Image (tube, helix red, strand yellow):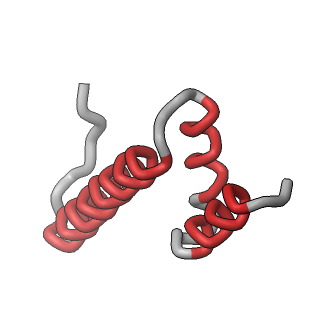
């Protein structure tokens, strides 16, 4: 695909974390605008990072890890 839209998409994908372009394209196909998709994915990644930090803190404290219901 060529043209200004594909060029802009290529540049916006380059600024994202590796592998982030595919989920954004999937959201775009579902009708979610690029900016909203990027914002959603960044919030999801931040939440995952927070949960990883919490897990590591629990592991260091010796707390038992169990699944939430």
**Looking at the rendering, which quadrant does residue 2 occupy?**
bottom right
In percent of width and height, residue 37 lies at 45, 46
> Front-most of 8 and 68?
8
Outermost right residue: 1
Q: Relative to residue 56, is residue 5 drawn left or right?
A: right
> Front-most of 44 and 62?
44
**Residue 28, placed above or below residue 2:** above
Number of numbered markers: 0
Give me the residue at 61% from left, 74% from top.
14
Give me the residue at 57% from left, 59% from top.
20
**Residue 23, placed above or below residue 20:** above
> Front-most of 61 and 35?
35
**Residue 16, placed above or below residue 24:** below
- Work out which quarter of the rendered image holds the C terminus and state it: top left
Outermost front residue: 4
**Residue 21, placed above or below residue 40:** below
Give me the residue at 24% from left, 61% from top.
50
Give me the residue at 55% from left, 37% from top.
27
**Looking at the rendering, which quadrant does residue 59 occupy?**
bottom left
In percent of width and height, residue 43 lies at 30, 53
In percent of width and height, residue 56 lies at 27, 68
- Work out which quarter of the rendered image holds the N terminus and state it: bottom right
> Front-most of 5 and 67?
5
**Looking at the rendering, which quadrant does residue 36 occupy?**
top left
């Amino acid at each position: 695909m060529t043209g200004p839209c594909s060029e802009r998409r290529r540049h916006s994908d380059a600024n994202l974390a590796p592998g982030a372009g595919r989920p954004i394209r999937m959201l775009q196909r579902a009708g979610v605008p690029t900016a909203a998709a990027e914002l959603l994915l960044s919030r999801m990644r931040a939440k995952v990072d927070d949960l990883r930090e919490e897990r590591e803190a629990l592991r260091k404290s010796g707390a038992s890890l169990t699944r939430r219901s």
